[in-house]
Every structure is written in structure tokens, then in C-alpha cells.
Image (cartoon, helix red, strand yellow):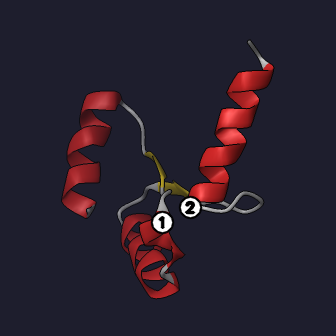
Amino acid sequence: MRQLCLSMSGDAGTNKVVLSGGVFQNRLLLNKTVALLERSNFEVYTHRQVPCNDGGISLGQAVIASSV
């Protein structure tokens, strides 16, 4: 994960990383990934008010549908 983020950050010109999806429901995996990325000077963003799994997808679909 760290190596991929380092590679992509150079291409994109940013140090911001967003962690999302059902895999990050696993608190141990989330905490270790955040710590690793922060030690490499990335700004890490995670969900706070929207669930990282299907609930977030539903919210995104509702937002898109309401803007059409």
C-alpha cells in the first residue's frame, strides 16, 4: 500500500490518501494502514459520518439521483 501511494503521489502531485471500502471496516487493518501512511508524510482521510461499506454507496447514489 505504501509503495503504491508513494508512486501515485509522485504522478498526481499530492500527498493526500483516502481510505474507503468494506476492507477498512477491519479496525486493525485501518489503524495499521493509517499509521504506515502517516509515517510516510501522507494526509490520510477516512469516513467519519458515512459508513465505509454499502451505506456509503447508497448515499452516493442518492446524491447523484437528486442532482439529475
Residue type, numbered disc 1 = Gly
10 Å crowding of disc 2: few (<14), some (14-19), many (20+): some
Residues at marks 1 and 2 touching, judged by CB atoms closer than 8 Å: yes
* Residue 35, x across and y down, in percent: 44, 76
Foreground of the two, 4 or 14: 4
10 Å crowding of disc 1: few (<14), some (14-19), many (20+): few
Q: Report whether 68 appears left or right of 35.
A: right
Residue type, numbered disc 2 = Asn
Quadrant of the image for the C terminus?
A: top right
Q: Which residue shows up at 67% across the image and 62% down it?
A: 51
Q: Which residue shows up at 26% across the image and 36% down it?
A: 10
Q: Which residue is mark 2?
A: 53
Foreground of the two, 47 or 34: 47
Q: Which residue is mark 1?
A: 22
Q: Report whether 54 appears left or right of 39.
A: right
Whether 62 is drawn above or below 4: the answer is above
> Label 1's element?
helix
> Label 2's element?
loop
* Residue 66, x across and y down, in percent: 80, 23
Whether 59 is drawn above or below 26: the answer is above
Q: Which mark is residue 7?
A: none
Q: Earlier in the sequence, mark 1 or mark 2?
A: 1
* Residue 28, x across and y down, in percent: 46, 87
* Residue 33, x across and y down, in percent: 39, 73
